[in-house]
Image (cartoon, helix red, strand yellow):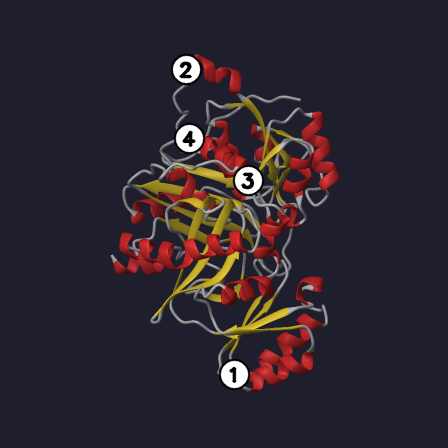
Amino acid sequence: MTKKRLFPRLFPVFSEKPSAMQNEQMKILILGSGGREHMLAKVCAASPLAKEVIVAPGNGGMSKEFAAFPIDVEDNESIVRLAMEENVDFVVVGPEVPLCNGAVDALNEKGVLAYGPNAAGAELEGSKAFTKDFLARHNIPTAAYGNFSEMESARDFLGKSKLPLVVKASGLAAGKGVVICETIEEAENSVREMLSGESFGESGKEIVIEEFLEGEETSLHLICSGEKYVTLPMSQDHKKAGEGDTGLNTGGMGAYAPTPLVTPEMLADYETNIVQPTLAGLKADGIDFRGTLYVGLMLTQDGPKVLEFNVRFGDPETQVILPLLEEDLLPTLLASAKGEDLPRNLKFKNESAMVVVVASKGYPESYPKGEIINIPDSLPENTDLIHAGTKQNENGEILSAGGRVLGAVGHGTTLSLAAERAYALCDSIGFTSKFLRRDIGHRELNRT
């Protein structure tokens, strides 16, 4: 099963290496079905090291560009079987669930090289309680907190805490397991619903209650190989469903990069006081961390504090970071997976990129599916359309299949130009329940 590789409009086809490199071309499997994985597939396909890119399970847009295999990414046996049957040389694991399930461990045991942390490293995302204890143990700045698995001790903690408070499901909750509580009653209700399994199932059977941090949130992505790392451009996500940062938390309604909010001096400080102690702490705890480390930071009056760790590329942040790349990413992913030295830095364009998530109305709660999406045959200049919650029917039509349906990406010499292009692309797309925020990047655009 092969398909012609379609190179993305936002990425150059990187120049060919010497002929010896052709013997090293690889078949690459991108594991996952979201916007993050669509962007990673495009980036890897643009590399001269890539002989072929396949995806599993993929989505409607990915299946038009790459051979797609409908496997269950939460089943390690299925992942390994596909990699072996398809003679895959390198697997890039996109989502958090297979990482936390030990997909990298399972692939490595069969001699298949894979990008991403092993199950021990993935615990940084799989358990917020684990992460908070890790941060405290290694003196890395974070919000004051308590971990709880039963109601009585949680209620006692609430009674001694200052409002507002943040209640988090400790386990994986697709970016939605966080409730900001303005009253004790609201906090007690959130705790009760989580611990009972009513809100987030097993993911909420252990919770974290922490102080509410004020400031601006930003995201730092690192590619790591043990204690070695390379930084990617800082980005800013927009988690709330409604404009003006109102409404429910989502997996992200849009993002932009780079954020001028973070100066080179500030980034150097984050590396010294957060990144390096984190990687040293992982090593001290016996964890050889390889793959992406996403550090969610709150920039408070008391300095930066860690909100969370993710152990994979952020979605939608990946859709604005990677279009800025000016060199082949694949060698760095390979070096990380092998535990080898990383480049001192990667070269990025002196431009801005913005993604606006085109969602189904009702997200992150209930929303319709199966609506036909009208997509223009040609896209505006300096844009790309990244598929997330889509599928393809028997007639080749693209249908909505998730809450976050598409990512409209624009880039340009300024953030305002990137925004103009991203929203022009949004306006060219049509489906019945189409919903989006019209103020992505509002803080930075209002500052300029």
Circle 2 — which element?
Answer: loop
* CA–CA distance in space, label 3 to label 2: 29 Å
For the N terminus, give its image quadrant: top right
**Secondary structure under badge 3?**
helix
Q: Which mark is residue 18?
A: 2
Label 4 or label 3, whichever lies nearer to me, is: 4
The residue where tag 1 is placed is: 161
Q: Are marks 4 and 3 in contact (CB under 8 Å)?
A: no
Q: Give the secondary structure at mark 1.
A: loop
Nearest to N terminus: mark 4 or mark 3:
3
Among the 4 quarters of the image, the one containing residue 427 = top left
Question: Which residue type does callout 3 highlight?
Answer: Glu
Q: Position of residue 213 (x, y in %)?
A: 43, 71
Q: Quadrant of the C terminus?
A: bottom left
> Mark 4 — residue?
328
Task: Please tell me in which quadrant of the rendered image residue 237 appears.
Answer: bottom left
Q: Quick one: label 1 or label 2, which is nearer the N terminus?
A: 2
Amino acid tagged 2: Pro
Q: Position of residue 90 (x, y in %)?
A: 58, 30
| Pair 2/4: label in front | 2
Image height check: is 127 above or below 4?
A: below
Q: Residue furthest top?
A: 19
Dot 3, how many residues are within 10 Å of its Cα: few (below 14), some (14-19), or many (20+)? many
Note whether residue 237 is visible.
Answer: no
Amino acid at dot 1: Ser
